[in-house]
Amino acid sequence: MKVLLINGSPHEKGSTYTALLEVAKEIEKAGIKTELFHVGTKPIRGCMACGQCRTSQSGLCAYDDAVNAGLAKAKDADGFVFGSPVHFAGASGMMTSFMDRFFYAGRAAFAYKPGAAIVVCRRGGSTAAFEQLNKYLTISSMPVVSSQYWNMVHGNSPEEVVQDLEGMQTLRTLGKNMAWLLKCIEAGKNSGVPLPEKEAAARTNFIR
């Protein structure tokens, strides 16, 4: 089993990385592999709703950037942790563009796989950013992994992040819970428990 942890910060080894690493350490202690993926600093286009990802055989986005690189890794992942710094009480602009296209193009790669979101802020806006990221999970049939508190940590630098003792403990608990849920799902598969039966999509337009 493997968990893909995605760093939506422009800083590859900054505060968000420090938080994700704390989660990854606990997952690996449980014997589950992890991989950290940085979205990078190159521009990531927003989704144009062109639909190519739905019609092409590859299922990849028309724009070949960090989103497609992430989608290639998502196919082999059994769980996901999405991390972002808080910018103006929301996820970073880079992470928002990434998530929009990542989930639109790769929805089939996420269904029934556990997911979690973590946010890092200097002072405020954390709960709004946390809620934003969780919405991607709950629209994609993903079991959402929780912790003992909301998955957030405070600090303006990696050195400050590790001083948030409660936040770091919350992240460690999240890692343990992710590993536990993955093992429960694996045990269910081995016992012959099938995935939920999926109905054909019903769409209601309110203006006709």
Image (cartoon, helix red, strand yellow):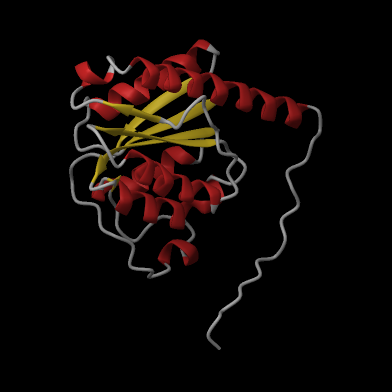
Q: From where the camera sits, is residue 203 visible? A: yes
Q: Position of residue 37 (x, y in %)?
A: 34, 33
Q: Quadrant of the N terminus?
A: top right
Q: Position of residue 41 (x, y in %)?
A: 18, 42
Residue appearing at x 48%, y 67% in the figure = 55
Is 14 situated left or right of 110 in this image?
left
Query: 88 above or below 114?
Result: below
Quadrant of res 97: bottom left
Asked where in the image residue 60 lies, by quadrant, the reply is: bottom left
Of residues 83 and 102, the one drawn nearer to the viewer in this rendering? 83
The quadrant holding residue 24 is: top left
- Left or right of 169? Residue 183 is right
Q: Is residue 192 above or below residue 180?
A: below
Residue at the image position 75 percent from the left and 30 percent from the top: 188
User: Could you tell me residue 155's position as x and y percent?
Assistant: 23, 25
Res 77 seen here: no
Q: Nearer the viewer, residue 71 or 20?
A: 20
Q: On the rendered image, what quadrant is the C terminus found in?
A: bottom right
Q: Nearer the viewer, residue 26 or 106?
A: 26
Taking the spot 47% from the left edge, 28% from the top edge, the residue there is: 149
104 versus 19 height, above or below: below
Can you give x and y, in whole percent of width and height, for residue 91 in the image? 30, 45
Say which residue appears at 72% left-offset and 61% top-offset.
Answer: 199
